[in-house]
Amino acid sequence: MTATLSLAGQVALVTGAGSGIGQSIATHLAGAGARVAVTDVDLTAAESVATSLPDARAYRLDVTSADQAAAVAAAVESDMGPIDVLVNNAGVSTMNHVWALTEKEWDFNFNVNAKGVFLVTRAVIPAMMERKRGVIVNTASMAGKTGPGLLAHYAASKWACIGFTKCCAFELGPYNIRVNCVCPGFVATKMQREEIEWESELRGLSGEQIFDEYVKQTPLGRIETPDDVARVVLYLASPASEFLTGADIDITGGAHLP
């Protein structure tokens, strides 16, 4: 029998789903039939996305708070049913030379990009383990493999995300819980626009020059879209990838290759 991308009857919780990649992921999962818990630190943004989907609910979630992670996981289970799919997508970035990095910048990136993934995963997996089924997809980054300049703290947090993914896959496999992560490249989002501004200032180049560099570093010749990421997340969440776990999948248009 051919595996499908259908998520009919399943409940998916997506963090950082109020905009950008997270919004696209929530939309694609809903399009495959999932009931989506749209979570974001910005409740208004989450509500806007949820109202655009056929069967979704919005929740405010600061992924750096263990109490909020536990409360939202419990609320989703109560309101919508057992969580079948967790997408840890919430992420932040800043840019700076490593010699100028502040402890505040380091902690900000790690608290969301690494600790946040851990806290939400920890809140969701006990019920998955009890049911002996579940899928977790984490949003890491090309930066978590390539070590780019000006992003030492961000790259380190995404390396942590990749390592955490692999450890979870090993430990949760016996419970029939699959854990994978995606590693996007230069994605056209609000975060990317901010990064172009920061990099422009730090390197003394125009925003247009920075953008052109991103395109030139991408063999497929264009900037990535949130939908490029969401389609792969849908695949990882679906029965089509039922024997795939512990993977860190590059979605970069080849930008990770040089």
Image: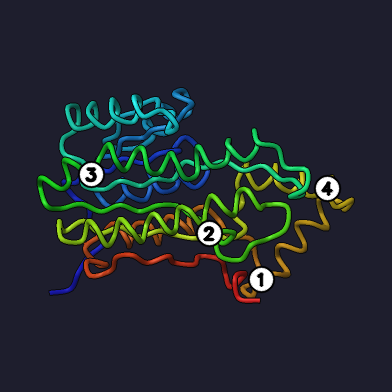
Q: Which residue is mark 4?
A: 202
Image position, residue 100 (x, y; %): 78, 43
Which residue corresponds to the image point at 58% horizontal and 73% vertical from the top-left?
254
Q: Nearer the viewer, mark 4 or mark 1?
A: 4
| Label located before the other in sequence (4 or 3) | 3
Query: In the rendered structure, which amino acid carries the disc numbered 4?
Result: Leu
Q: Nearer the viewer, residue 151 or 240?
A: 151
- Please give the label number shown on residue 221: 1
Query: Element type at marker 3?
Result: helix
Marks 3/2 in contact by CB < 8 Å: the verdict is no
Alpha carbon of mark 1 to alpha carbon of mark 2: how far?
15 Å
Which residue of the protein is positioned furthest toward the left in this rendering? 131
Alpha carbon of mark 1 to alpha carbon of mark 3: how far?
39 Å
Image position, residue 165 (x, y; %): 37, 57
Which residue corresponds to the image point at 82% horizontal and 49% vertical from the top-left?
200
Marks 1/3 in contact by CB < 8 Å: the verdict is no
Query: Element type at marker 1?
Result: loop
Which residue corresponds to the image point at 72% horizontal and 42% vertical from the top-left?
101
Q: Residue 103 falls in which quadrant of the image? A: top right
Alpha carbon of mark 4 to alpha carbon of mark 3: how far?
41 Å
Query: In the rendered structure, which amino acid carries the disc numbered 3?
Result: Ile
Q: Residue 61 falls in which quadrant of the image? A: top left
Q: Which residue is mark 3?
A: 125
Q: Callout 4 environment at 10 Å: few (<14), some (14 to 19), or many (20+)?
A: few
Query: In the rendered structure, which amino acid carries the disc numbered 1?
Result: Gly
| Label located before the other in sequence (1 or 3) | 3
